[in-house]
Image (cartoon, rainbow, N blue to C red):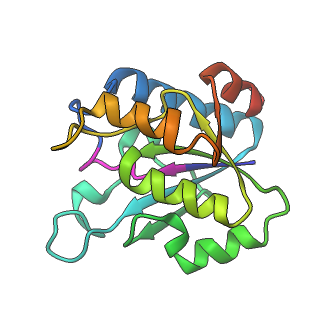
Amino acid sequence: MILLVIDMQKGLVDRDLYAYDTFVDRTLRLVDAARKSGVEVIFFQHDAGQDSGMSDGDEAFEIIDALAPKEGEKVFAKTINSCFGNGTFREYMERQDDKRLMIIGLQTNYCIDCTVKSAFERGFAVIIPEGTNSTFDNDYMTAETTVRYYNEDVWEELADAVTFEEAIAMLGG
């Protein structure tokens, strides 16, 4: 299994996220459990382009300090919502024997959604732990409704929704 941590960047991790405290706590705990048990952790950063304020070299682009990647952990940048848009990552994943991919991070209705769908289409067994993806309110739905809609409906046939405790156990914690 690989734990994929998406867009936990200083410019996105904000108290306006749905269930902020639970989301951040569970994300930190899953990364810690994966590291302790030797499960590979891969980080992604969304690069919105030069002069966006959210690009390589910008403070907002950096992964939050509490999740700073450890030496040897892979960090990829992406310019589209799906992590599989990064060719180096896509090729790396194609070479993996273990096709289980636990996906956590931001934002539910953008990069998490696109990555879940892309992983499923490529034959990966996608695992979505409860309370480990989040987003903001939008013009159409509250953040809570958005998170519930994707986790409980959109991904129903694409991913295994597991409790947080089940996810910790899967990571050997």
In which quadrant of the rendered image does the C terminus lie?
A: top right
Residue 118: x, y in percent? 58, 64
Please say if 64 is above or below 117. above
Quadrant of res 137:
top left
Instruction: Give the main secondary structure of the magenta stretch.
Output: loop
**Residue 149 inside the magenta-drawn segment:** no
Q: Is residue 74 left or right of residue 13?
A: right
Residue drawn at point x = 76 percent, y = 32 percent: 170
Q: Is residue 100 above or below residue 34?
A: below
Q: Is residue 107 visible?
A: no
Q: Position of residue 36 (x, y in %)?
A: 71, 34
Q: Is residue 9 magenta?
A: yes
Vertical order, 170 against 111 (above or below) = above
Q: Which residues are magenta?
A: 5-12
- x and y, in percent, of residue 55 in the image: 26, 68
Residue at the (69%, 72%) spot, across then down = 92
Vertical placement of 118 versus 125: above or below? below
Residue plotted at (42% across, 28% down): 23
